[in-house]
Image (cartoon, rainbow, N blue to C red):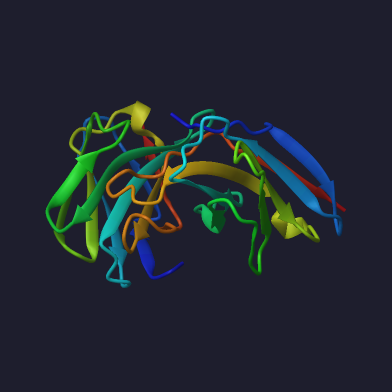
Amino acid sequence: DAKTTQPTSMDCAEGRAANLPCNHSTISGNEYVYWYRQIHSQGPQYIIHGLKNNETNEMASLIITEDRKSSTLILPHATLRDTAVYYCIVRPLNSGNTPLVFGKGTRLSVIA
Amino acid sequence: DAGITQSPRHKVTETGTPVTLRCHQTENHRYMYWYRQDPGHGLRLIHYSYGVKDTDKGEVSDGYSVSRSKTEDFLLTLESATSSQTSVYFCAISPTGNEKLFFGSGTQLSVL
């Protein structure tokens, strides 16, 4: 079962920052927060992951609250190509054979 | 997509026939996964493999079997296809199981 809660859908104007929230109030100390996205008809794509510090890469930034019960994925300048379903997943670091479990995600629509 | 090839990309078959989907990787990753994706259910794990001849069940494994006789190939078999197995099937790979997953482009299977 997914241990995260995300809004079903969100809209964002092209060129603006897209802020996608995720609640994970039962997260454990050894669990990381992962974000993936799935553009229509394609396989999911890894975006970013973090434990407790904020993370940034070429695709996005991940902001995790100090109590680690929620996080926000930020796409700084959304484009139409960022329209996709975004999945927030929590998973232990040393999970060995425990695979990723995907929830329903947030459908982000970037509007021109 | 990260050296992953799924075949076939599309298949139409009849109820009761056996079907085998193939996932081939060129990354020498240890972990391989089969997911299915249906409207309203998101991505659900069918089976996964953590090494040659080492496999385990996911949350929706009934009616499916898998085999991994070599690192680069992970086969998903529907012994007797049913209409409820009409879906999009995604293969994924991971170096250690603890890191990000790389997904293939998917196989659209229709069972009539």
Q: Which quarter of the rendering shows the C terminus of chain B?
A: top left
Residue B104 seen by the camera: no
Residue A14 seen by the camera: yes
Q: In x, y percent, where is residue B53? A: 12, 54
Q: In the picture, residue A47 is in which quadrant?
A: bottom right
Q: Residue at x 78, y 50 (%)?
A: A18
Q: In x, y percent, where is residue A73? A: 68, 50
Taking the image as shown, residue B65 lies to the left or right of residue A46, namely left
Eyeballing the image, is B94 above or below A7?
below
Eyeballing the image, is B36 above or below B30?
above
Q: Residue at x 72, y 35 (%)?
A: A9
Taking the image as shown, residue B25 lies to the left or right of residue A54, namely left
Q: Residue at x 57, y 43 (%)?
A: A87
Q: In x, y percent, where is residue A61? A: 68, 58
Eyeballing the image, is A35 above or below A77?
above
Q: In x, y percent, where is residue A23? A: 62, 34
